[in-house]
Amino acid sequence: MSININITDEKKKNVSITKFQSERKIIQSAAVPIELENIDTDQIIPARFLKATTRDGFGKNLFRDWRYENNNETKPIKDFALNNTIYSGKILVAGKNFGCGSSREHAAWAIKDYGFDAVVSSFFADIFKNNALNNFLLPVQISDEFLQKIFKAIKEDANAELEINLEEQYIKIISTAEQENFEINKYKKTCLLNGYDDIDYLLNIKNKIEAFEAATV
């Protein structure tokens, strides 16, 4: 018995995802540092902003309670990294145990919508890591020691750049040439390198699926 899925209809559900573009196999950028541990998903995107049903627009409320005094957009907290004009870039660098707490996928949506392509930490909550990969946000998990080297480099120069090479699976501090390898799920790596979501991947192997189905009838 075969199960038929209308892939075109399924694909329509995913059109709002901003993909990890193929030309972004290497991300070279300055970074925004948040040197705090145990950053949970309720701080990344507070629960009161979870009413939307699409992935768009969450970036404006990323770290909302840390960005503004008393939730007042006219009173930004100047010392917070996202408000500090000396920091910019496509890479967010955070302390250990990033993305803990609830399983809300909106946390990954908010980070990606804000403009980050990667998050670097020495440990990620498993559900957050999976949500990030499903939304073309690259979680780069490194050692505590190398994380501290990155924070040090940014403290010394706010414009210090990092290079994240997805294909070769390493992250490098450009100014010192120090680098460290990171792990990533093989399937998710394939998806990111090719700009595939799960439906794209199925479409890519459609001929193999049809051949297998024909051989088992």
Image: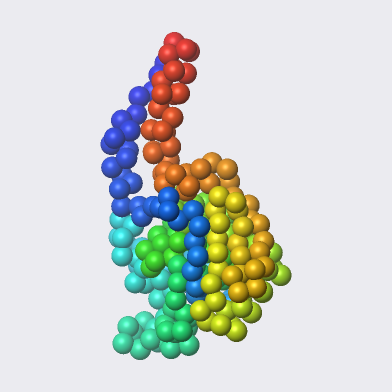
Question: Image quadrant of residue 71?
Answer: bottom left
The relative height of residue 155 versus residue 198 in the rendered view (above or below) is below
Using residue 87 as the reference point, say whether residue 51 is left or right of it.
left
Residue 111 picture location, percent across and down: 43, 65
Using residue 145 as the reference point, say whether residue 118 is left or right of it.
left
On-image quarter of the N terminus: top left
Query: For the point 57% across and 79% down, which residue is it?
Result: 154
| Residue 176 in sight from this viewpoint | yes
Residue 83 picture location, percent across and down: 42, 82
Query: For the point 37% across and 72% down, which residue is it?
Result: 61
Total residue callouts: 0
The relative height of residue 63 versus residue 2 in the rendered view (above or below) is below
Residue 26 picture location, percent across and down: 50, 57
On-image quarter of the C terminus: top left
Using residue 91 as the reference point, say whether residue 170 is left or right of it.
right
Color style of the picture: rainbow
Query: For the point 41% across and 44% down, which residue is it?
Result: 197
| Residue 98 in sight from this viewpoint | no
Question: Image quadrant of residue 98?
Answer: bottom right
Query: For the point 41% across and 47% down, which residue is it?
Result: 195
Q: Nearer the viewer, residue 214 or 150?
A: 150
Residue 174 picture location, percent across and down: 59, 70
Question: Image quadrant of residue 78?
Answer: bottom left
- Identify the residue at the far right of this view: 145
